[in-house]
Each structure stands twice: as structure tokens, then as C-alpha cells.
Image (cartoon, grey):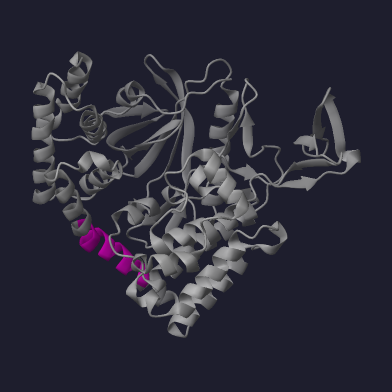
Amino acid sequence: MAVSYGVPAEFINALYKKDGVIALGFEQYLCESLIGSGGLGVVIKAKKSAGLTVALKFLHTQAQGDAGDILERFKREIRATKIVGDISDSCVRVYECGEYALQNFGSIPFFSMEYVPGLSLEDFILLRETPFTPLEIWVLARQIAMALDDIHAKGIVHRDIKPSNILVHETRRIVKVTDFGISRDVSSDTGVTMAMDDGIPVILGTPNYLSRYYFDTVPVDKSDVFEKSPGRFTRRSTGEHVTADSAGRYVCAYKGEKLDISVLASTILFELATRVNPFAGSPLPSILTDIMRGMRLDLKTFFRDHPDFFHDQARKKPAFIERLARIIRKGYNAPRSRTYASAGELIRDLDGAIKSFCGRVPGAAEKDDIMATILGKTLVDEYEHVLRRCERAVRDNAEADDKTNINRIMLLYKLKKTERLMACLDLLHAKTAELARKKEPERTSCAFLLELWEKLERFGIEDRYRENSALLKTALQNAP
């Protein structure tokens, strides 16, 4: 089975039409906006006829031949989300699932789930021009750890914990974990990689947020091994794939909770402290090598070399930095036995870190106030900071130099359309017209603007901008 990752625009456009009505089962849904599209699916914000706002997730795959693995992953996501969401506020709730007949695309599997108003943690990090305070780092990391505690209590390992899969509810001031597409029940036989027809394994997970233990193994007793076919072994009790190591002992992939906890305790905590993902922009082999070696996560060295990446409050309290560095070191410790055994253990160390900063562990009411401050400051002050940065880039003709600018402009537009932001878009609109008139348009700028306008069009952008992507496509086709 060969899979082409990336949802094509024609599928998104056929499925999503702003103010369009989708009939799913006995329900009518009014589409309001496109929330996003990932490797295999599209998520749409919609309102049921009864008035409830939901998120609709549709599966798309360009799998050639048998797409059973992809469909199974989608079903697994529904099951895992429902298991946790039904009993915990730490996960979105699932309402219904089924198939939707879409012209030219056949029957599309879907499920509807709780819509979380607000932003993902990835969005918050993207919007922040100022570092998170020690209290903000603590409360966010602690809430994510509590969510993992709930998920693991139901026997589920998420395996793709990253900022884009952590939603911050803007009114309830809590975090919710989403996207259980590669999660696994600890009693299941699913591995951490998916073997393709050509024999090349594809990693299930996001390289920048892989656990150091993704490729760890655990021993399997010889009596529990069955040779399914010559050279291919499975574990009788679970059906898992088994291999023989260099010493002839049988092993299978590690699949425990530490896959999630270690990522939070190392990479995500490092990113909350610095707003930098240490593996961003590197090729996959380099990322995998450095993750396996425990490289790039030395917070004390980073603090020494880049003190401006840390909040003033943290710089004045080196004991807090030292505590965080200690947690991160334990989070990616080489022997798996010496890292965090549970989310509860990580929470205790996070509480110890904040105690070194303010002499106590804040109570429930104070935690709520900290979350309110994060939401308010980010959506007001940080919005203005990022808008100024984007304005400078556009004014200096440097907007295409940093692809992150696309995500920043998208996020600003999604949050609120201020006069300054619309003036910025008008300038980009004028640049688009100028590029389209040239016989030899600058391809980097064309590619940047084309991606920006195509994404914005899916959010119901104003009529005056709607021909921009078509103009740029024509210009690029006609260019020598």
C-alpha cells in the first residue's frame, strides 16, 4: 500500500463550502469555517440544526489499493477519543460517526466531536512574542500532564503528543488533548511504525516530537513466540510483531505510557520555556540521531547562550531554570527505567519547580487566574506584537523569507480582522496583482502568496481577494 500524504485542495473544496449544508444521517449541519486539514483528514466547524456547534472530521486517503490500515487508524481514533472523552474533561467528546457520500469521492468516513473554542498550544507559541512566565509554563505543562494521566488511566497511549494536538479552551480555561489517530491500547498489537509494500517503514508520529523510546524494545518469552511464516514472528498472547535481536533473543516494540510522558517532560517543556522547538528545520536522519542520543535538550546551556529567550522572572530565579533542566534531563534519560514512570510523578516535579520560584504551589483559583492571563495577554497584547512583525515583513518585501509568516497571517485573520490586518492584506493583494502582470514573476514570492491566498480562501475570505490564487497560478503557468 502506497499512501500519498496531504489532502488535495479539490477534496477540501468539494467537502467544505462556507454556509453550505451537509446532511449526515438524520442531522443537517451548517458549515461555518474550515478548522484545518492534516495528512489524512479535514476538520470543519459546523452547527447542528438544534444549535450545537461541533467539529466534523472527515477521512481522506489517496491510498492505492487496500486502504485498510488508514481506515483502521481512523476507527482507532474514534474509539480512543470516545473512551477518554466520555469520562474526562481532558479530551474532546465524540457524538456520532458514519459515512458521507461525496460526489466524485465516494463514501467518506466521518465523526462529529466536541468543538473547542480557542487555539491550539502551537498557535499560542506562534503568537507569543514574549516568553512564557514561570507560572504560565508550570500551569500549561501541569494541565497537559493531568490530561495524560486521565488518558493513561483508560489504557490508552496517545503517541503523538505535540502542541498542535493540545487545545486551550478559551472560556473554560482548560486544555484538551485531541487527534488519537495513532494512539494505541496498551493491550493491542499495533506498532510504532507502519510497514509499506516496498518494505520501507513509515514512522507514525511527528519527527520533532518523537519520544526517545519510540524504537525501544521489550523482551518476549520464547514460549510466547509463533513463526507465522519463514522469518516472520508474532507474539501469541497479543499478535504483535516480534523480531530476534543480535543475540537471538525475541523482542517486540515498547508501547508504554513513557512514550507520551517523555515528550511532555522534554521537548514540549523545553519549547514552553524557550518558544523554540530544538529539532525544527532539521532533516529527519539528523532529528532521529539527536533524539536517540538525547541531544539539543540541554536547557542550562541554552539559557547560558540565549538568556533573552527566557522571561525576566525566570532569569532572576536560576533555581527555577535548574529545576526545569533537571526535569528535562530526566524526561529524555537514556535508560527508560530512569525516566518518569507516570504523569503523576512528573506533576510532583513540576510542583517542586514552581515552589522554587514562588515558595508555594498555587491553588485551584490561582491556576484559573493564570490560565485567564495566558488567554487574555496572548489574544490581545501578543496579537499586536505579531501583527507589527508581519507588517514589517510585508513593508520590507521580506514576507516570503519566513514561511512561518503564512501561519502567522492565517492565525491573525482567524482571530480578528482589525483595520491594520486588512491593510496588510490589501498590500499583499496589490503585490499579487503586480506579480501576475510580470512576464517572469519571482517564483518564491508567487509560491508564498499562492499558498497564503489558497488557505485564506477556505476561511471565507472577502470577495476582493478571491481571484488572487487563480491569477498567480496563471502567472506561474505562463512564466518561461
Q: Is residue 20 above or below residue 181?
A: above
Q: What segment is highlighted magenta in the picture?
A: 370-383
Q: Is residue 137 above or below residue 88?
A: below
Q: Is residue 419 magenta?
A: no
Residue drawn at 32 percent across, 33 percent down: 29
Q: Is residue 375 magenta?
A: yes
Front one among 344 and 402: 402
Residue drawn at 22 percent across, 48 percent down: 412
Front one among 430 and 36: 430
Residue extending furthest toward the bottom: 359
Residue extending furthest toward the front: 305
Residue 243 position, x and y percent, is 78, 35
Residue 441 position, x and y percent, is 16, 24
Dividing the picture into quadrants, the one containing residue 135 is: bottom left
Q: Which quadrant does the N terminus fall into?
A: top right
Dividing the picture into quadrants, the one containing residue 205 is: top right
Q: Secondary structure of the magenta portion, mostly? A: helix
Residue 333 position, x and y percent, is 64, 60
Residue drawn at 38 percent across, 65 percent down: 306
Q: Is residue 108 above or below residue 19?
A: above
Q: Is residue 104 above or below residue 157?
A: above
Examine the rendering and report whether any part of residue 139 can be seen.
no
Q: Which quadrant does the C terminus fall into?
A: top left
Residue 103 position, x and y percent, is 36, 15
Q: Is residue 350 left or right of residue 397?
A: right
